[in-house]
Image: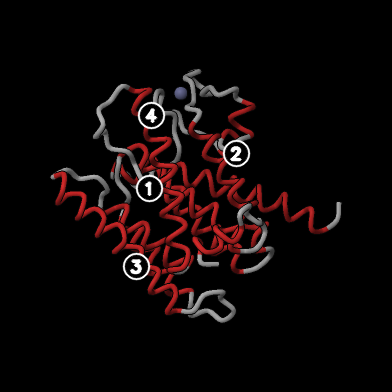
């Protein structure tokens, strides 16, 4: 195998390991538990999980999804999260190659992924991810060779936040119901900080479209009312993910003029 091929495999394996960590963070953080202590254990029999039973993806397959000591079923969320994280890493490598930007944008995608899992489960997005991410996103624009200028990322953060903040205020004014939360506004601020303000129009457009389609299906399937709260974070995150390969010129969209205009490319 040529050298470049090895890096595809490395980026996938690295993503699997980061996925293991995302599992811990996404489960423990919103529950107010420490991320470092105690080490992984079976929730049923409390048996400590040794390193060889804690290898991402592989251990789940070898154990056939059961705890080694008590046979309790291990949730499918663990291998699925690891696998998605591995694929996100490969996506970042595909877009940025071996560079600091691979690490930065894979970190960005991992943060969006973690926020999305927590949002889906708890309907909240931790400020440490969204606000912390927004500050980091603006900060990295000062690195030499960044595609974006500090002004573009700063405007991205501000415009991203205000866009949803204003829509949410208007929605509340007219319906007296909370549609989107401040968590979504802060998350879009973070997205704007990493991708620049030009990215926001297309991301909000695609995110809303997905939110309406998938949200409607979910509401019909679950038989909940029209005002059942849909987490918007995962849709915004997914749109940001779609934007990255287009931004990097890896994917050409059909109707490119229309989408280029919309995405500000
Ligand atoms: Zn057990």
- Horizontal and vertical percent position of residue 232: 36, 45
**Image point (37%, 43%), residue name:** 118
Q: Is residue 248 left or right of residue 140?
A: right
Q: Is residue 221 left or right of residue 178?
A: right
* Secondary structure type for disc 4: helix
* Colouring: secondary structure
- Nearest to the eye among marks 3 and 1: give it: 3
Q: Which mark is residue 233?
A: 1
Label 1 to label 4, Cα distance in Å?
16 Å
Q: Residues within 10 Å of mark 3 (few under 14, many from 20)?
A: many
Give whichever of discs 2 and 4 has the lower sequence position. 2
- Nearest to the eye among marks 2 and 1: give it: 1
Closest to the observer, 20 or 262:
262
* Secondary structure type for disc 2: loop
Give whichever of discs 4 and 3 has the lower sequence position. 3
Give the residue pinned by disc 2: 55
Please identify the quadrant where the C terminus is shown.
bottom right
**Image point (42%, 79%), residue name:** 151
Give whichever of discs 2 and 1 has the lower sequence position. 2
* Secondary structure type for disc 3: helix
Give the residue pinned by disc 4: 218
- Horizontal and vertical percent position of residue 146: 56, 76
Q: In this view, which residue lies farthest toward the right?
A: 1
Q: Which mark is residue 159?
A: 3
> With respect to residue 164, does 231 lie above or below?
above
Tell me which corner region of the image, top left, top right, bottom left or bottom right, holds residue 79.
Answer: top right
């Amino acid at each position: 195998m040529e050298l470049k091929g090895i890096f595809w495999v490395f980026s996938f394996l690295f993503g699997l390991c980061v996925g293991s960590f995302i599992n811990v963070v996404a489960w423990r953080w919103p529950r107010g538990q420490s991320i470092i202590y105690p080490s992984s254990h079976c929730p049923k029999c409390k048996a400590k999980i040794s390193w060889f039973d804690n290898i991402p993806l592989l251990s789940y397959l070898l154990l056939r999804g059961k705890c080694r000591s008590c046979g309790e079923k291990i949730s499918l969320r663990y291998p699925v999260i690891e696998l998605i994280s591995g694929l996100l890493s490969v996506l970042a490598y595909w877009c940025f190659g071996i560079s600091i930007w691979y690490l930065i944008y894979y970190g960005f995608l991992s943060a969006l992924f973690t926020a999305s899992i927590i949002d889906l489960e708890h309907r909240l997005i931790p400020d440490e991810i969204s606000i912390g991410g927004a500050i980091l996103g603006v900060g990295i624009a000062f690195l030499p060779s960044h595609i974006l200028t500090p002004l573009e990322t700063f405007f991205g953060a501000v415009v991203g936040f205000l866009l949803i903040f204003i829509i949410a205020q208007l929605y509340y004014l007219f319906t007296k119901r909370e549609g989107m939360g401040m968590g979504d506004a802060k998350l879009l601020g973070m997205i704007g900080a990493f991708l620049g303000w030009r990215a926001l129009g297309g991301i909000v457009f695609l995110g809303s479209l997905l939110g309406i389609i998938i949200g409607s299906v979910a509401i019909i399937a679950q038989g909940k009312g029209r005002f059942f709260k849909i987490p918007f974070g995962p849709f915004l995150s997914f749109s940001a993910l779609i934007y990255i390969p287009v931004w990097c010129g890896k994917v050409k969209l059909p109707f490119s003029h229309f989408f280029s205009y919309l995405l500000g490319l």
